[in-house]
Amino acid sequence: MKIPGEYLSASPEQTLEWGKTLGRSLQSGEAVFLIGKLGTGKTVIARGIARGLGWEGAVNSPSFSLVKVYRGRMTIYHCDLYRLKPGEDIRQIGLEEQMEEADSVSIFEWSEDFPIAGYVPRWEVRIGDGVKEEERVIRWEKVVLVDS
């Protein structure tokens, strides 16, 4: 994938396919932060990422369970932080330790208000509405450590 990039999706199916492409490119230890308002397709992209990583089962929003774990070519942690209070709640459920697990990828929905925002390497994926009802504008960049 060209980094940074932008893609105009015309449908949920195209959004899912874009997520698959991202999933196929992910490496162990990376995280994906899905950023967008309610209903823009964060979970659709998470489903695509999981498919791209080899998971064939269901992928639904983990809003009530907070974290769902899938097994593809790597362990996939799909996390939804919507119901948490920014700051201390994230430490109580052990998400930071999961992100450090070898041979895993973490996907975070609603991550922008949490201290994990300093975690790298990460993909920041911003999803916005397009002009037409089902269109989505997907913008991404990869954030990595830079030696000073």
Image: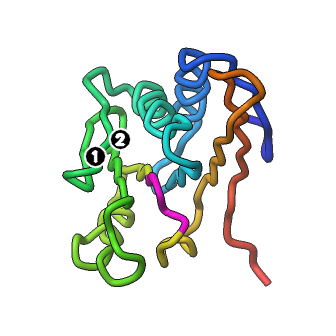
How far across and how far down the image is residue 71, in percent? Answer: 26, 36
Residue on which disc 1 sits: 62
- Report the quarter where the C terminus lies: bottom right
User: Which residue range is magenta in the image?
Assistant: 108-112
* Mark 2 neighbour class, 10 Å CA radius: few under 14, some 14 to 19, many 20 or more: some
Res 98 → quadrant: bottom left
In the displayed structure, 110 sits above or below 113; it is: above
- Report the quarter where the N terminus lies: top right
In the displayed structure, 77 sits above or below 148; it is: above
Which residue is drawn at the image coordinates 41% and 52% (left, top)? 106
Observer-nearest of 51 and 103: 51
Which mark sits nearer the N-terminus, 2 or 1? 1
- Residue 47 as seen in the image, left or right of residue 139: left
Q: Residue flagged by tag 1: what amino acid is it?
A: Pro
In the displayed structure, 10 sits above or below 75; it is: above
Of labels 2 and 1, the one closer to you: 1
Q: What element carries label 1?
A: loop
Q: Residue flagged by tag 2: what amino acid is it?
A: Met
State the CA–CA distance, disc 2 to disc 1.
Answer: 19 Å
Mark 2 touching mark 1, by CB under 8 A?
no
Residue on which disc 2 sits: 74
Q: Which colour scheme is used?
A: rainbow
Res 93 → quadrant: bottom left
Res 75 → quadrant: top left
- Residue 47 as seen in the image, left or right of residue 39: left
Q: Is residue 110 magenta?
A: yes
- Residue 59 as seen in the image, left or right of residue 28: left
How far across and how far down the image is residue 136, in percent? Answer: 67, 30
How far across and how far down the image is residue 37, in percent? Answer: 56, 48
